[in-house]
């Protein structure tokens, strides 16, 4: 495979696969490569159960009607992802065990040099790319808790995202730090292990929506397969209807004071699961009402001064979301320097970044996949002049980026997302950099066409016909009117 590629896609998770499908099937373009640091497709797994109803956690190009469970387990999701990869003949575009270390824009040559490392051998490699689509995912760099003495623990310490299958938990005293999605899923499973004693250390309260790991009935699967449009309607039903907080009715009453949040539903991510609260009633499970002050060689010291011995510490403490996962340098600055200047991650439509030509990111909220497919619809329009050889680069203007992000942050003021600490926010309590405050329909509409006035285009060939330019640059009057209408509707929605 050539190291000179028109498009480099970073990541072979759902986002990278969606990008590849759009390039290949909708744009008819095949000169691309997908660089993936793991040994196969699939991306990051948050525990072993999807925390979104599975019919909404699938690609619109490959709807699946016969899922076994409403919230699906990892083996079936992986089987789906592998099937999509094979159905679209994407494997020969993929290079596995290849971690992107850095990417740097070469202004004179109008391309990126991409440095990678073989995760098995450590061998370096250099690639060249006209365009980078970064589908690295925001939840894949494990965040370890900053607890004094953790490095001195003589037992086993592991993060939920780096699970060590060689560790035998039978008969062990296990501390689980964290009670988000990963913590809840771990606690739903390991207490059944023979002889285990588990203590969970709560850090924050969360709303839970139990019961969605249950199997799908044969009748429901038949209906989703054979009734026209039912699978599409079901996806929308899931999105609009399934927001209910049943935590109070299912949580053990003795733990209500530490389980029931004081903030509104949605401030933190809702946790799906069928068995978590019932597990808390097991005799070999306990919840610490005190946090961890420090760790010593054989256990932890709680904030109320108790010494608790443990053999294993499991950190279900989330991911680093404020730091870009690889070194990226644009025309004049690095991505981290740009983030620092803006108080955290910042992009136009969550997709393009001023100072970084021909660079696009993928990521979204509610249904990440829906947002990523919307972004690829938008990206496809951006990169077409480059793919056609009619231009050399595009770059969003600082003015357009700032105006967009000002609108987003203004909209945040009228949502539940500012009521509590969460990973959605920079540093846990700063600006919200991970959530779109409007509806998914609003974001879909915004991604339908590119307002080229918001971009700087380089290398537009003089021989390009006015008809072709009108296709790329759009009708300014139409775009302006549509953008104004969309912005007005979104602002009205955001303000309620």
Image (cartoon, rainbow, N blue to C red):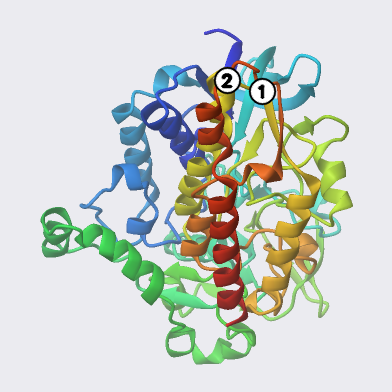
Q: Nearer the viewer, residue 342 or 450?
A: 450
Q: Quadrant of residue 57?
A: bottom left
| Secondary element type, mark 2 | loop
Where is residue 338, by image quadrant? Answer: top right
Instruction: Specify few, some or many for label 2: CA neighbours under 10 Å numbering under 14, 14-19, or 20 or more.
Output: few
Circles 2 and 1: CB atoms closer than 8 Å: yes
381 to 183, vertically: above or below: above
Against 376, residue 481 (above or below) is: below
Is the C terminus in the top left, top right, bottom left or bottom right quadrant? bottom right
Percent position of residue 337, x then y: 87, 43
Question: Residue 266: horizontal and vertical position, in percent?
Answer: 57, 75
Instruction: Judge left or right: residue 456 versus residue 481.
Output: right
**Residue under circle 2?**
464
User: Which of the 4 image quarters holds residue 179?
Assistant: bottom right
Which residue is tagged 1?
Answer: 460
Residue 38 visible in this rendered orientation of the protein: no
Give me the disc on residue 214: none
Q: Which of these two is toward me, 237 or 274?
A: 237
Q: Of tags 2 and 1, which is closer to the observer?
A: 2
- Mark 1 Cα-neighbour bin, 10 Å: few <14, some 14–19, many ≥20: some
Left or right: where 494 falls relative to 301: left
* Residue drawn at point x = 60 percent, y = 39 percent: 136
Residue 164 seen by the camera: yes
Q: Nearer the viewer, residue 496 or 160?
A: 496
């Amino acid at each position: 495979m050539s190291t000179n590629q028109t498009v480099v896609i970073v990541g072979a998770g759902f986002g990278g696969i969606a990008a590849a499908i759009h390039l290949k099937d909708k744009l008819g373009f095949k000169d691309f490569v997908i660089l993936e640091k793991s040994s196969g497709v699939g991306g990051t797994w948050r525990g072993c159960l999807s925390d979104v109803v599975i019919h909404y956690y699938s690609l619109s190009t490959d709807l699946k009607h016969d899922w076994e469970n409403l919230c699906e387990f990892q083996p079936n999701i992986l089987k789906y992802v592998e099937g999509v990869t094979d159905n679209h003949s994407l494997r020969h575009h993929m290079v596995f065990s290849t971690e992107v270390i850095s990417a740097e824009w070469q202004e004179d040559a109008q391309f990126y040099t991409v440095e990678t490392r073989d995760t098995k051998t450590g061998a370096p490699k250099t690639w060249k790319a006209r365009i980078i689509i970064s589908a690295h995912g925001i939840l894949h760099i494990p965040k370890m808790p900053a607890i004094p003495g953790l490095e001195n623990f003589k037992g086993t310490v592991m993060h939920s995202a780096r699970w060590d299958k060689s560790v035998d938990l039978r008969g062990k005293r296990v501390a689980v730090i964290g009670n988000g999605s990963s913590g809840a899923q771990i606690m739903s499973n390991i207490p059944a292990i023979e002889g285990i004693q588990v203590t969970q250390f709560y850090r924050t309260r969360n709303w839970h929506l139990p019961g969605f790991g249950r199997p799908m009935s044969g009748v429901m699967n038949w209906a989703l397969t054979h009734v026209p449009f039912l699978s599409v309607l079901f996806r929308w039903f899931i999105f609009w209807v399934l927001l209910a907080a049943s935590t109070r009715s299912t949580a053990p009453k003795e733990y209500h004071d530490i389980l029931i949040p004081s903030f509104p539903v949605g401030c933190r991510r809702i946790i799906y699961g069928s068995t978590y609260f019932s597990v808390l009633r097991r005799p070999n499970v306990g919840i610490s009402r005190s946090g961890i002050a420090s760790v010593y060689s054989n256990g932890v010291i709680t904030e109320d001064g108790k010494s608790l011995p443990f053999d294993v510490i499991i950190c279900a403490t989330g991911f680093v979301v404020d730091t870009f996962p690889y070194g990226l340098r644009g025309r004049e600055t690095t991505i981290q320097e740009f983030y620092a200047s803006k108080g955290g991650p910042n992009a136009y439509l969550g997709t393009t970044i001023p100072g970084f030509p021909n660079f696009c990111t993928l990521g979204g909220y509610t249904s990440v996949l829906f947002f990523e497919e919307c972004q690829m619809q938008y990206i496809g329009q951006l990169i077409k002049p480059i793919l056609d050889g009619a231009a050399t680069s595009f770059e969003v203007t600082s003015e357009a980026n700032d105006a967009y992000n000002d609108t987003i942050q203004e909209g945040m003021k009228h949502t539940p997302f500012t009521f509590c600490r969460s990973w959605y926010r920079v540093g846990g309590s700063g600006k919200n950099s991970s959530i779109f405050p409007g509806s998914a329909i609003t974001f879909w509409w915004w991604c339908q066409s590119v307002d080229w006035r918001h971009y700087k285009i380089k290398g537009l060939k003089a021989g390009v016909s006015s008809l072709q330019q009108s296709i790329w640059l759009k009708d300014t009057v139409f775009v302006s009117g549509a953008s104004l209408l969309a912005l007005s509707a979104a602002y009205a929605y955001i303000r309620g």
